[in-house]
Amino acid sequence: MNYISDRATRVAPSGIRKFFDLLSRMEGVISLGVGEPDYTTPWHIRESAIYSIEKGMTMYTSNSGMPELRQELSLFLQKMYGLNYDPVGDILITVGVSEALDLAMRAILNPDDEVIMADPHYVAYDASVMLAEGVPVLVPTYESNNFEITAADIESCITNRTKAILLGYPSNPTGAVLARKQLEQIAEVARRHKLLVISDEIYSRLVYGVEHTCFAELPDMKEQTVFLGGFSKTYAMTGWRIGFAAGNKAIIAAMTKIHQYTIMSAPTIAQVAAIEALKSGEKDIMEMVADYDRRRKFIVKGLREIGLPCFEPRGAFYAFPSIKSTGLTSEEFSEQLLMEEKVAVVQGTAFGPSGEGYIRCCYATSLADIEEALVRMRRFVEKHRQ
Ligand SMILES: Cc1ncc(COP(=O)(O)O)c(C=O)c1O
């Protein structure tokens, strides 16, 4: 008897995790694999959570999240992007952007509705659409075009089943950012075709020498955008599992209904920590971003010197070099690099078919480790280059 639903069967396990199960059994591996900061959450944020436990804050919160957190977030979004989100009704606190993404898809999609997204893309994008019985429509993006998804390419994919455009910028895995002008062109297409835009901006604060434009701040787009953001990457808080969705009241209410029955409320302790992060975390962000930027420059230069052409990432903490000159597929490259040189990277195809010929290297790790990884990669590339 097969008890597994078609829905669960259709979705492939994450190509990242498969690899890291293997890695966890090996010694001496340098990992440029998992996409998370190597920092521990800043002390004042941890301390606020400890105090909340001492004070006995151990109960559920409101389904939507603690009023104080929604209030702080609303102020923050106003200050950063000039956006006015009502803390009551426009904001939902979630278990990371992961949950917010799942809720958004389940709240908006009917079976076979289509969602347009860039390829390569974050691993959960197509999966979350499929788990909501929708159909992901992949728009290939290319290094020659800075891995940018264009309004024209999006428009060419629109059918009478298209419900939404899912954007993720700065991009995981490529590090590409989208400039205001391109976003405006995408907004124009969304407006004309009345498409919802789900905008995952979890890396919005991790940009280097460029400005981040929030999609919802574009003219007339606030009501038509579900803005997803989080604390995992910005404040080195991956394990706390806290994120948010902001958008129009009808969509946030539908998402809250699903959240109510599946999650109830995001972890209370983590919500207290998130309040502290918003109130006093700015200095930490500045320090971490400056540090990521040093590592970004170092790894991009190093990869290019090895002979792996590397697109210059302007956001997030990933480099996405081409490995085409080795003649290996991205899966062969990453598996053999791990086995022969004990360096873990992620094959580009874990992020969709357009990732073939590329690998993702996360540089949120120490400069010393990046340096050693580059030495090992050079040896590997020299051995395999055709
Ligand atoms: C683009 C993107 N969106 C969402 C997430 C999920 O983040 P969270 O920890 O908030 O669930 C990640 C994590 O890697 C990501 O890279």
Image: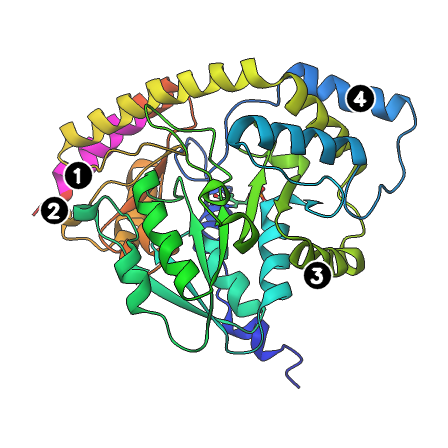
Q: What residue is pinned by disc 1?
A: 381
260 w.r.t. 143: above or below: below
Amino acid type, callout 1: Val
Q: What residue is pinned by disc 4?
A: 50
Task: Please state which of residues 292 and 67 is positioned toward the viewer in this rendering.
Answer: 67
CB under 8 Å between discs 1 and 4: no
Task: Please state which of residues 12 and 127 is positioned toward the viewer in this rendering.
Answer: 127
CB under 8 Å between discs 2 and 4: no
Amino acid type, callout 3: Ala
Q: CA distance from mark 2 to mark 1?
A: 9 Å
Q: Mark 2, residues whose alpha carbon is within 10 Å: few (<14), some, or many (≥20)?
A: some
Q: Quadrant of residue 67?
A: top right
- The magenta segment is 372-383
Q: What residue is pinned by disc 2?
A: 325
The rendered magenta stretch, by its main secondary structure, is classed as: helix
Q: Earlier in the sequence, mark 2 or mark 4?
A: 4
Q: Which of label 4 and label 3 is nearer to you?
A: 3
Which residue extends farthest left? 386
